[in-house]
């Protein structure tokens, strides 16, 4: 039996979509990719008058972070760091996105912190999580942009 053929049957991690997940009470269910970009660039800082956006981003080397940097920020990791240093220095934001070290941590925080938003590997999104449509599409649907 050829075991090398079995390895290719499992989905590769780079083929799995990254879900955009928010706190269950966040008043949003669909965002365009441009709106997602505004949120993660800190240009939109509130979901509503009394609910601030709380950005959660995976630590360096996580695949979810790479997808976000490439697709949303369109920056390298060093450009991302410089962007947030400058934004905080100019008092355009109180803080940079909070770093999370695992999808489990992202799941925990996004459900615990009102206004939180994070990117999580679709295979690790917990039941009850509020997954946001991007450009009208959910992870796994044709044309979903976060892969």
Image: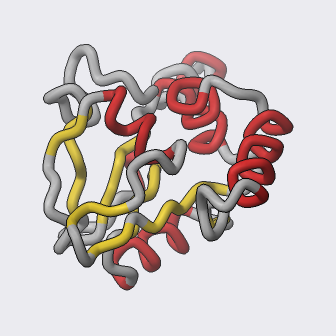
Task: Locate residue 11, reporting x and y percent.
Answer: 46, 29
Residue pictured at 78% horizontal, 48% vertical: 86
Q: How is the image coloured?
A: secondary structure
Of the 4 image quadrants, the one containing the N terminus is top right
> Can you give x and y, in whole percent of width and height, for residue 117 in the image?
40, 60
Say which of 82 and 74 sits in front: 82
Q: Quadrant of residue 88?
A: bottom right
Locate residue 29, reporting x and y percent. 14, 50
Q: Residue furthest bottom?
A: 112
Q: Quadrant of residue 79?
A: top right
Q: Position of residue 85 (x, y in %)?
A: 79, 53
Name the residue rendered at 59%, 32% in the picture. 73
In the image, residue 19 sits, relative to residue 34, either above or below, namely below
User: In the figure, 81 relative to 125: above or below?
Assistant: above
Say if 126 sits above or below 78 in the image: below
Left/right placement of residue 26 relative to residue 110 reads left
Q: Residue at x 18, y 29 (%)?
A: 137
Decide: is 31 above or below 15: below
Q: Is residue 3 left or right of residue 119?
A: right
Q: Nearer the viewer, residue 59 or 83?
A: 83
Q: Nearer the viewer, residue 32 or 21?
A: 32
Instruction: Look at 79% across and 37% down and name the residue there.
Output: 77
Farthest front residue? 90
Query: Is residue 76 shown left or right of residue 144?
Result: right
Q: Quadrant of residue 50?
A: bottom left
Pick the quarter of the image with the C terminus: top left
Numbered-mark total: 0
């Amino acid at each position: 039996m050829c075991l090398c053929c079995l390895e290719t049957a499992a989905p590769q991690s780079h083929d799995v979509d990254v879900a955009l997940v928010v706190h269950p009470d966040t008043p949003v269910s669909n965002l365009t990719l441009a709106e997602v970009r505004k949120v993660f660039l800190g240009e939109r800082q509130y979901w509503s008058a009394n609910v601030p956006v709380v950005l959660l981003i995976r630590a360096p080397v996580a695949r979810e972070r790479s997808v976000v940097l490439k697709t949303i920020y369109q920056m390298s990791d060093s450009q991302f760091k410089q962007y947030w240093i400058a934004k905080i220095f100019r008092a355009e934001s109180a803080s940079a996105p909070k770093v999370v070290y695992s999808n489990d941590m992202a799941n925990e925080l996004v459900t615990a912190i009102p206004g939180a938003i994070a990117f999580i590997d679709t295979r690790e999104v917990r039941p009850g999580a509020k997954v946001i449509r991007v450009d009208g599409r959910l992870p796994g649907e044709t044309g979903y942009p976060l892969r």
